[in-house]
Image (spheres, grey):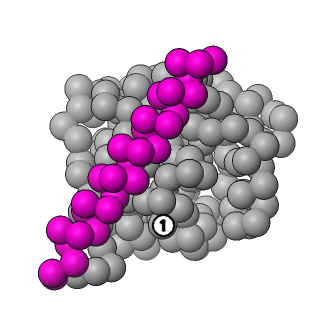
Amino acid sequence: MKNVLIFIVATAVAGTSGYALQRYLASDTDTHSVPVTEIASPIIGKTRPEFAMMDIEGNIRNIKDWDGQIVLLNFWATWCPPCLEEIPGFIEIQQELGNRGFQIIGVAVDNEENVREFASEMAMNYPILAGEMEAIELSQRYGNTIGGLPFSAIIDKNGKVTHTIMGELTKDRLISILEQLGLAV
């Protein structure tokens, strides 16, 4: 437990520092965007790893529940500023495209109680899974080798991982990726 707490604090400090640096470096050109880094991960092009986790409603959810859909698997935390920046856009996209073969799944690397409260306040309209070490290990299985947040993996309708993204994923960038995957936006 002590190691988990140290990891969480270190990740929060690193994430916040990285976010601040990105904002500072971007301030000369565009103060409203943070660069997204697509990771050339060995998982890209491979079948998504199987998993099942409990959601914040107390239900076990399996990645297979969303077979046949394009899935954005987003790893985030309530204490991560760039994570919180991308959530409103995700809520909008889920509302717009949720009935057209697209599903966002949030995987919180955080305390379940904090996540439940935050999700309620934000009226998050997509499934939220919560776990601490379990979520960290899952993000690693999806290609997050440095353990940073936010981290996103996009899975196509055939269950193949097509993109892994470190950093804030903007609504415009996500829409561009979805169009590349054949979802008419």
Q: Residue at x 83, y 42 (%)?
A: 57
Is 89 drawn above or below residue 107 in the view shown? Answer: below
Q: Is residue 116 left or right of residue 143?
A: right
Magenta region includes residue 2? yes
Q: Residue at x 46, y 44 (%)?
A: 12
Given residues 83 and 124, the one toward you in this image is 83
Say few, some or many: other residues with alpha carbon within 10 Å of mark 1 (under 14 / 14 to 19 / 20 or more). Answer: some
Q: Is residue 75 left or right of residue 177?
A: right
Q: Is residue 147 left or right of residue 28?
A: right
Region rendered in magenta = 1-29
Given residues 3 and 162, the one toward you in this image is 3
The secondary structure that most of the magenta stretch takes on is helix
Q: Residue at x 35, y 72 (%)?
A: 172
Q: Is residue 10 left or right of residue 1?
A: left
Give the x, y percent position of residue 48.
Answer: 43, 28
Give the x, y percent position of residue 42.
Answer: 23, 26
Q: Residue at x 59, y 19 (%)?
A: 2
Residue 18 in sight in this render: yes
Magenta region includes residue 60? no
Residue 184 in sight in this render: no
Is 118 drawn above or below residue 114 in the view shown? Answer: below
Give the x, y percent position of residue 61.
Answer: 71, 32
Is 98 drawn above or below residue 159 in the view shown? Answer: below
Q: How many numbered badges does the structure rendering display?
A: 1
Instruction: Say what amino acid the circle numbered 1 marks.
Output: Glu
Q: Which residue is mark 1?
A: 85
Quadrant containing the C terminus is: bottom left
Q: Give the SS element for disc 1.
A: helix
The quadrant holding residue 25 is bottom left
